[in-house]
Each structure stands twice: as C-alpha cells, then as structure tokens.
Image (spheres, helix red, strand yellow):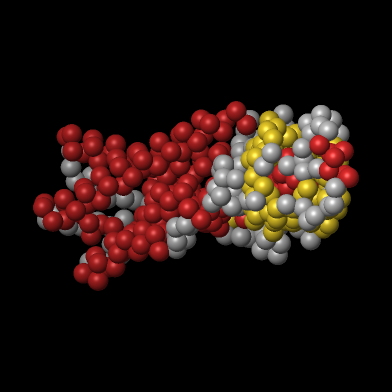
Amino acid sequence: MQRYSRIAIFLHWAIAALLAFQIAVGWALEDLGARGFALFQWHKSIGITILLLTLARIVVRYWKPRPAPVEGGWQGMLVKAVHAGLYGFMLGAPLTGWALVSTAKVKVPTLIFGVVPLPHLPLPMSANDPAFAAHSVLAWIGIALFALHVAGALRHHFLMHDGLLWRMMPARSPVMLAALPALIAGGFVLGRVILPTPAPKVAAAPAPVEEEAPAPVAEAVDTVVNAAAPTGADNAVAEEEPVGPPPVWAVQPGGSIGFSVGNGGETISGGFAQWTTKIAMDPDRPDSADIRVEIDLASASVGDSYQDGMLAGDEFFGVAAHPKAVFTAKGAKKTGANSYQAVGTLSLKGVSKPQSIRFTLSGAGKARKVAGSATIARASFGVGNGESSAGLDPKVAVHFGFRAKAE
C-alpha cells in the first residue's frame, strides 16, 4: 500500500500531538487566573507552531504525491469534509487566538517560546469579542473533528482491516503503530500534568480580613480612622478631658478596593482581593490616627487571566521582588462636614512616596461606613513601564468602600 511521504508523516503526528496538548491546556486556562500566565505564553507559542506546521503540511500535500482515497460515496465525502474541517481548524484557531491577543485592551507582548517576538495584527479593538467567540467555537469544533478523525482511523484498522493506518506510518511496524499514536496521548497527558495545582479559592479573598491595595489601602485605612471620628460638638468636650490611647478599628467583611485606568479611549478596571490593615484612631481626634495597610499585589485582578499574569510581572507590580504594597499614615484632617483627607506614605515596587487620599464617612458611634478615592501617578512607582503600557493613562484612579467597627 502506498504511503504518505516521510515529511507528511512527521507533520501529521507532530501536529496531532501538539493539538492534544492544546486541548488539555485550553480547557483549564480560564480557571487558572494569574497562575496561568506562563501557560498562556506556551499556549500561544504552540498555537503559532501549529499554524506554521499546518502551512507546511498544505505545501507538502500538493508537492508530494499522496495515496488515493480508498472509499467513495457518502463515506468518502465525509472523510473529505472532516479533513477540510481539520485544516480549517488548524489554521483558524491560531489565527483567531492571534487576533484575540492583538485586540486586547492591554497589549501583552508575545514571545514565541520566550525568544521570538510575535507582532500584533493590525486589527481594531472592536474585533476582540468576535475573535473570542470564533476562537471558542473553533476549539469545540476542532475537538469534535479530532475525535471523528481518530474514530475513522480505528474503524479502518480494527473493523475493516484494510491497512489504511499503515499509510501514515514510516514503516509497517507494530512498534510504530503503538509509539506514534502514543504521542497524541502523551501530548494530552503532558498538558494536564503541567497545569498548576488549583488555588485555594476560599483563602484567596477572605472577606473578614481587612484587605487592601497600595493606594486604596491607604485610603481605606485613613477612611476607617476618620470614619470613627464623631461630628459635631463632642470634640470640644473631648479636648478638655484626659486623653487615652486611641481605639482600634476593624474593617468588616464585604469591603472592596478597586482601581481603573484609561487605555486609548476605554477603561480597564480591577481590584485587589487580599489586604490587611492595622488602624488605631480616636474619633474625636483624627490627628491621632495610626494606620498601616499591607496589600498582597499578587491578588490584583482585572478579570482576565492573561492580563492578571501581566500585572504580576516586572512591567507592572513586580510581585516576585516586591510582593506587597504598604501604606502608612500618621493622622488625618477633616475637610468638610463628612469629608476627610489623610496624607501618608505609599511604598510600592521598591519606591516610597507621599500619597494623599480623600474619603467620606457615614453612620455614628462604633460603626462607620467609609467611601473614598485617590489618584496615583503610576510612573512614579515604575508601574507600567513597558510596551504593553504605552496606551495607559499616567494616572490610576483608586476607589474603596467598606464598613468598620471600633473594638
């Protein structure tokens, strides 16, 4: 029986193994969050590799003689349709993935296997949603076609006994018959094995713990401090009485700290899931505030797994070298009926600079509701210092809201 050329055989099994790897990894990427950043890079690199190998396979298909079809009728038409669909999938999936990356709000650089830079396609950002939809649909279509192709090969070999499978083997050898299909299974298993272990989601964002982000944290803390500050005439009486240590305030579950930044006419929004605070302040004397907020920068998220991985990198927060951002403040002042301002120090990515926050308080007694905001000049802290940050606005808006109780 006539065989395919050796180069066609090599390309066939190499592409099949890589596709199995992509399927195994692709199923899990969306659930990995920032931990999946490295795998996203691999996913893109292998996707482009499949694209190039598929183009080579098409060239070989028309350059080298190939065996004639063994079936006619509707079976032959089905085989041709599956083959055509597979080629469409192997070309379309990488191309839509490339378009997806090229039209993302944050332009994440792609280095093929960490070495060769892949330029972005000149597409408008409005193409992002269609690219995402097409990429997702193609993935499922590809899985179905992949399964049909394998089922057809098994049918010919084990039911029809026509030796069709030997045409895609470099030699009629039982070893080859076992080893080459095993590459496909190996690609799938490898894709599953290298997936990061599931993150403990419960610990990822514990509501009761006072959490915060760099600037927002600062703001939140000051907010809480001032939140405890009573309004009105009580201050005058308090000043005449002996002064004791300021009470400690605890942030209650359900608070949030978010951020947003402009990006070429659009807005990227996110927040921090983990932050802790130490707040002491006499409600009658805002200047007695003693605040310290620590933010786990690895908990930053903009709602996109791939971009979350970028946030942890050196271009943005540099989490490996600087895992936490710290805001400290001594004292706060009242700027209006229910408005306050606190000036402290924000330490972020190895840089410490003054940072001001503004907030409002509502409620009374030992329970206060805090809402506030701040504006951070990201360049001052080296946040957003690469190519993918070129379109970002220089100032990042931070907003926060939470409840606090005096202990």
Q: Nearer the viewer, residue 159 or 338?
A: 338
Is residue 30 toward the left or the right of residue 225 in the image? Answer: left
Q: Nearer the viewer, residue 71 or 197?
A: 197
Could you tell me if residue 62 is visible in this image? yes
Q: Nearer the viewer, residue 306 or 347?
A: 347
Rendered location of residue 170, percent (x, y):
30, 64
Quadrant of res 233: top right
Rendered location of residue 399, percent (x, y):
70, 38
Q: Across the whole image, how many numbered discs are drawn on residues?
A: 0
Q: Nearer the viewer, residue 303 or 370?
A: 370
Please give the name of the residue rendered at 57% of the width and 30% of the height, measured from the top-left corner: 127
| Quadrant where the image shows the N terminus | bottom left
Quadrant of res 21: bottom left
Is residue 343 toward the left or the right of residue 359 in the image? Answer: right
Rendered location of residue 58, percent (x, y):
42, 46
Please give the name of the residue rendered at 58% of the width and 56% of the height, measured from the top-left corner: 112
Q: In the image, is residue 74 above or below residue 275? A: above
Quadrant of res 158: bottom left
Rendered location of residue 6, percent (x, y):
36, 61
Residue at the farthest bottom position: 175
Please give the name of the residue rendered at 31% of the width and 47% of the height, measured from the top-left corner: 146
Could you tell me if residue 187 is visible in this image? no
Please give the name of the residue rendered at 65% of the width and 54% of the height, measured from the top-left corner: 276
